[in-house]
Image (cartoon, rainbow, N blue to C red):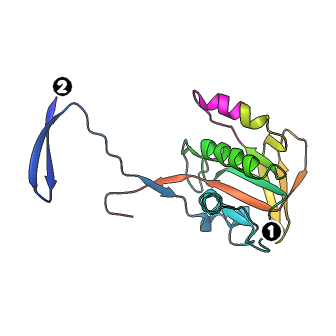
Amino acid sequence: GQFHVEIDTPSGGHTLMAGAVVQATGSRPYDAGKLGHLGYGVSPNVVTASRLDEMLAGGGVTRPTDGKLPGRIVFVQCAGSRDPQHLPYCSADCCGTTLRQVAQIHQAHPEVETAVIYRDMRTPGQTERFYAAVQQQPGSMFTRGEVASISGNGTLKVRLKDSLLGDDVELQADLLVLATGAVPNSADGE
């Protein structure tokens, strides 16, 4: 059924009839400072997906340590998500963000390799077709696995466990991107 909703605005109060109320509080990225085990804060070449978006919008993807175009960018999905020590839930948009970023990188810099390390790629509906198209890009690799360790400062060594590539696999990364989850904004602004 419908109900009355009272809304206060600067010009006064209003009453509306509504059948549902959606509270769209917005969100912010999870604090990557809590992800030192994934290299954030340890190496400047470990950045968040938000920082990569800033780079892409600014016209170029560069390694923070030397300002050069990275030869290989490794993406780590569920960075802090689906983890009882951090965010226990899936934020539902990180996979789509990574796919968009990989597509943008391959379009702007076809010589750059990308590797995406995921638990599950969650691509509902039409996003599944986009996922298939991005996978077919030359220089694009996707593998299921978990990050066991990250070492190095310039070129990073990303060691994987339980990977589809095999046991004790190590990937080199010139830039590591953490696909951090989303934290809902609260009414009190926190």
The numbered mark at residue 126 is none
x, y (%) of residue 167? 91, 45
At 72% from the left edge and 31% from the top edge, which residue is drawn?
132
x, y (%) of residue 76? 72, 52
Q: CA distance from mark 1 to mark 2?
A: 59 Å
Q: Is residue 40 above or below residue 105?
A: below
Q: Quadrant of residue 189?
A: bottom left
Image position of 11 (left or right of 40): left
Residue for badge 1: 68
Q: For residue 120: magenta?
A: yes
Amino acid type, mark 2: Gly
At 41% from the left edge and 52% from the top edge, which residue is drawn?
26
Q: Quadrant of residue 190?
A: bottom left
Which is more toward the observer, 54 or 149? 54
Residue for badge 2: 1
Image position of 111 (left or right of 184): right
**Label 2: which secondary element:** loop
Q: Residues within 10 Å of mark 2 (few under 14, many from 20)?
A: few
Whether residues under marks 1 and 2 lie with C-beta atoms below 8 angstroms apart, the answer is no
Q: Which span of residues is magenta-colored? A: 119-132
At 52% from the left edge and 52% from the top edge, which residue is drawn?
182
Q: Is residue 25 above or below residue 46?
A: above
At 55% from the left edge and 48% from the top edge, which residue is drawn?
88
